[in-house]
Amino acid sequence: MTTLAEIDTALRRPDLTPLDRASLLLARKRAFMGYQSKQDSTTNPSAFDSPLPEGPKGED
C-alpha cells in the first residue's frame, strides 16, 4: 500500500501530466479515507455495522 507521504512526494514532480496528477490525487484520497476508516473503526462503531432503521409503514 502506498503511503500518503509517497503520494505527496510524487505530486511534487514537475513533469506530471494532468492525468497522472488526477490519478495521484485520487489515490491520495483513497489512502486518506482508508486511514480515516481504520481510525474510526477503532473508536466508533461503523454505520454499516448497525441494522437499517425501519421505514414508515405504508398501506398497500
Image (spheres, rainbow, N blue to C red):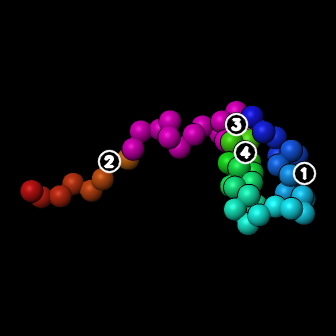
Question: Which stretch is magenta?
Answer: 37-52
Task: Name the residue that disc number 4 marks.
Answer: 31
- Mark 4 neighbour class, 10 Å CA radius: few under 14, some 14 to 19, many 20 or more: some
Which of discs 1 and 2 lies nearer the camera? The answer is 1
**SS state under label 1:** helix
Nearer-N-terminus badge (2/3): 3
Task: Name the residue that disc number 3 marks.
Answer: 38
**SS state under label 4:** helix
Taking the spot 21% from the left edge, 54% from the top edge, the residue there is: 57
Q: CA distance from mark 3 to mark 1?
A: 23 Å
What quarter of the picture does the N terminus occupy?
top right
Question: Is the C-beta separation of discs 4 and 2 under 8 Å?
Answer: no
Is 6 rendered above or below residue 41?
A: below
Taking the spot 90% from the left edge, 59% from the top edge, the residue there is: 12
Task: Name the residue that disc number 1 marks.
Answer: 9
Which of discs 3 and 1 lies nearer the camera? The answer is 1
| Residue 9, horizontal then vertical, whole percent | 90, 51
Q: CA distance from mark 2 to mark 3?
A: 28 Å
Q: CA distance from mark 1 to mark 2?
A: 47 Å
Is 40 rendered above or below residue 7?
A: above
Taking the spot 86% from the left edge, 62% from the top edge, the residue there is: 15
Q: CA distance from mark 4 to mark 2?
A: 34 Å
Disc 1 residue type (three-letter)? Thr
Quarter-of-image position of residue 35: top right
Disc 4 residue type (three-letter)? Ala
Q: How many marks?
A: 4
Quarter-of-image position of residue 52: top left
Task: Name the residue that disc number 2 marks.
Answer: 54
**Residue 46 visible from this viewpoint:** yes
- Mark 2 neighbour class, 10 Å CA radius: few under 14, some 14 to 19, many 20 or more: few
